[in-house]
Amino acid sequence: MLEALSAAGREQSNAAVMYHSALSERVGLGVTEEKTLDLLQRLGPLTAGEIGRHTGLAPATISGLIDRLESKGLVRRARDTKDRRRVIVEIEYARLAGFAELFEPFMAGLARVYDRYTDDELELILDWITRATAVQREATQTLGEA
């Protein structure tokens, strides 16, 4: 069973990477850029340090990433109104028009998958995803420190 779970996890991981690679290419972004925009959409404006904590990427990588997104007009750096020394990265939502429609077929497919499970089963799946994500973030951070 553990071998089957490992193989299925690798397949799911590969499918996710390939999906986001195709999506990113379609909208003219790198995968890391696309996923950082997703992070900002879900969590709201973040500092570079907060982006680093959520992604596990090194500070120099985050700085270049924000520069690229800013040069494409997708984010802007803004001073925190409460602490002027702090810089927050915000999405330029007008530039993201049309991105959401690209996700609709995938989201509809996931909804069909979710419909097959009970709430208790979905809770178990959510627990596994949450724990596996934490392990993967830790591994990402370790790789970035090497």
Image (cartoon, grey):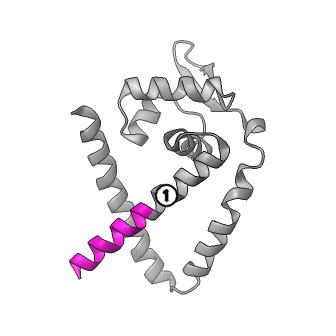
Confirm whether the magenta stretch covers residue 32: no
What residue is disc 1 on?
18
Left or right, 112 with reference to 10: right
Give me the residue at 65% from left, 48% from top: 26
User: Is residue 109 depicted above or below 79 in this figure?
Assistant: below
Confirm whether the magenta stretch covers residue 3: yes
Q: Position of residue 37 (x, y in %)?
A: 59, 41
Q: Give 59 or 7, whichever is nearer the viewer.
A: 7
| Label 1: which secondary element | helix
Q: Which residues are magenta?
A: 1-14
Q: Position of residue 89 (x, y in %)?
A: 58, 28
By secondary structure, the bulk of the magenta-drawn segment is best described as: helix
Under mark 1, the amino acid is Met
Give me the residue at 66% from left, 44% from top: 27
Q: Residue furthest top?
A: 85
**The image quarter in which residue 60 lies:** top left
